[in-house]
Amino acid sequence: MSAGATFDEIRRAPAAELNLCIYPFDYGEETARAMQDKFDIPYQADIVPIGFTFNYYGDDHTEVGITSNGYLTFGSDLYNPTNVPIPDISPPNDLITPMWDDYKPNWQGHVRYMTLGNEPYRRFIGEWIYMREDDPPHDRCTFQTILHEGSNEIMFRYWEFPPESYPGDRTAGLENQDGTEGVAIDTMAVEPFDC
């Protein structure tokens, strides 16, 4: 799948390609449970256990970096607030991002994660709640990424995301280990749908 893929192209991608689905945000029992609150200062990030083995671009992972700037990564750059288009060879790479931007979690926002379910159907949830953008008007965004055990499905869920101030204001999509391949999502046209 090439960069700039539409939602329809992503939804209809062959099974052999990356499995990405876009859904409406479900703020139900899953996210209402006591998810571990991880971040409260700008640019903070952590490497956390997924709770199962997740295969991404052919590599198996049991840990993932989660950042206050709206992305997960299996790479080493956990502190990049400056989003760039996907794909791009500059770090961060090995990237899963529902909405990468410069957020300030200490402005009443939260970044949380949790692994739910039982083997072989566990789910890792990364959640960004009420994240304020650094640039005025400091829009508030709420979204999730869910990684599924076994199927290696990646699910993005969106609840609150005001229109972008300009094209490229935020970055969403998937990128391989060296940034040479990826699937970019047009964040100006995010619309939830079922896979």
Image (spheres, rainbow, N blue to C red):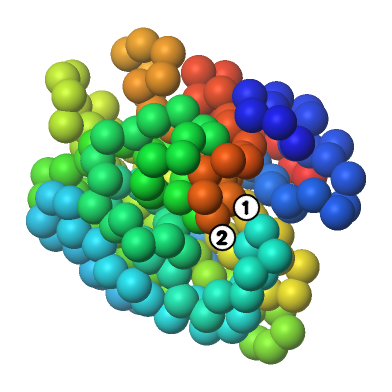
Can you see residue 195? yes
Position of residue 115 in the picture relative to residue 14 (left or right): left
Is 125 situated above or below 169?
A: below
Answer with the quarter of the image where residue 75 lies.
Answer: bottom left
Residue that carries the numbered disc 1 in the rendered image: 155
Res. 146 mark: 2
Task: Report x, y in % for residue 102.
Answer: 24, 37
Number of numbered labels in the structure image: 2
Q: Amino acid at mark 1?
A: Met
Identify which residue, 66 or 155, lies in the foreground.
66
The answer to whether mark 1 and mark 2 are in CB contact below 8 A is: yes
What is the quadrant of the N terminus in the image? top right
Q: Residue furthest bottom?
A: 119
Identify which residue, 30 or 83, lies in the foreground.
83
Helix, strand or loop under label 1: strand
Helix, strand or loop under label 2: strand
Task: Report x, y in % for residue 158.
Answer: 50, 40
Give the residue at x 50% y 18%.
188
